[in-house]
Amino acid sequence: MERLLILNPGSTSTKIAVFDGENPIFNESIVHTLEELAPFEHVADQYKFRRDLVLECLKKHNIPLDSLTAIVSRGGLLTPIEAGAYEVNDDMVWQLEHKPQNEHASNVGAMIARSISLQLGIPAYIYDGVTVDEMLPINRITGLPVHRRKGMGHNLNTRAAAMRYAREQGKGYRDITVIVAHLGGGITVNLHQDGKIVDCIPDEEGPFSPERSGGLPMFDVIADCFQDGMTQKAMMKIVKSRGGLIAHLGTTDSRDVEKMIERGDEHAKLVYDAMILNIAKNIGKIAPDVCGKVDAILLTGGIAYSKYVTSRIERYVSFIAPVVVYAGEDEMKSLALGGLRVLRGEEQAKIYVSPDKT
């Protein structure tokens, strides 16, 4: 039986799990306060702090280090990569430490995995990293040559949903064509065809969501950027974590919004219904890639638990393809299953080569 350590560092937590094969032994989320993280100027500086917490957690759950077969971590913000598994190597750790695409807690995961794997002499992998980008060239072109569309999105959860659908249909992942909408704090829509994510509408250009502004009227945004006192950091904060539902209604919790609607709040209903329609519009926007020949539209993520949301999306888009709901996201299990496919020879891990390391 393979025993896997699963790591998923987030901005305010470190999720840790151990799986024996497909079965979880434990799954724990350690929350970090702002005060705990304040001393660290950069995400990479949190490496030792989070590594120690991982080791303490294993000790608490009576998991001997030498019982581990492999480690699988959420992938950090590397340069663009393909979907699937990558071995965690020195190039990957160097890239995440010195030249990540952006600051994100997931960058630390591979660092911790590499350290423990070297100590134990076992393999470490990332799976379906944040920067998976398999978009077709035609889907990258924009109206300005210096700006190209990118495939960054909720790849881990959307690929897991697509592979689940394929299994349930008795098919291989490469044999299905599905649109997957991840409905969470950020909302992304992507298209899976021939075993790849060939197009993606990321949360920076798609529907607004509980936390993000989504696509905006560009001329107005340009004007906002030049307001007195506005900085790039402040503007990014507005569109990335202060937009969407929280900007309109003061909450990022869709359940709170639905309670407002139940109490007769017409403004809340208008905003919420607009978000839902925006999701549907973006599902429709990506369908022409395959001339509308889609096997299914999959709805996943936390908001997919809401029948209010999913039933309305289905009403809007069922003319394209049947709608299947896979509510929630189990990133820890998705990482474990990815690692198991490698260990069992069902998939081969790729080798990351840093384009920047000399």
Image (cartoon, rainbow, N blue to C red):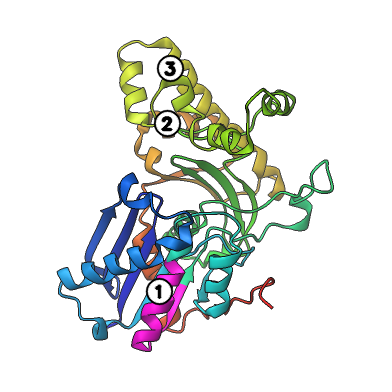
Q: Amino acid at mark 3?
A: Lys
> Where does the magenta region start and end?
109-125
Residues tagged 3 and 2 counted as in contact (Cβ below 8 A)? no
Secondary structure under the numbered disc 2 in the rendered image? helix
Question: For mark 1, does the 10 Å Cα neighbourhood hold few (<14), some (14 to 19), or many (20 or more) residues?
Answer: many
Q: Which residue is mark 1?
A: 113
The residue nearer to you, when weighing 214 against 56, is: 56
**Residue receiving disc 2:** 309
Which mark's residue is nearer the viewer, 3 or 1? 1
Pointer 3: residues within 10 angstroms few (<14), some, or many (20+)? Answer: some
Residue 216 among those drawn in magenta? no
226 with respect to 325 (left or right): right
Q: Residue at x 65, y 43 (%)?
A: 286
**The image quarter in which residue 74 lies:** bottom left
| Residue 34, percent from left and from top | 34, 45
- Taking the spot 30% from the left edge, 13% from the top edge, the residue there is 263
The amino acid type of the residue labelled 1 equals: Ala
Quick check: 21 above or below 219? below
Residue 269 is tagged as: 3
Helix, strand, or loop for circle 1? helix
Do the residues under discs 3 and 1 have CB atoms within 8 angstroms? no
- Does 119 lie within the magenta span? yes
The three-letter code of the residue at mark 2 reads Val
What kind of element bears circle 3? helix
Separation (CA) of disc 3 from disc 2: 11 Å
Of marks 2 and 1, which one's residue comes earlier in the chain? 1
User: Which quadrant of the rendered structure holds the N terminus?
Assistant: bottom left
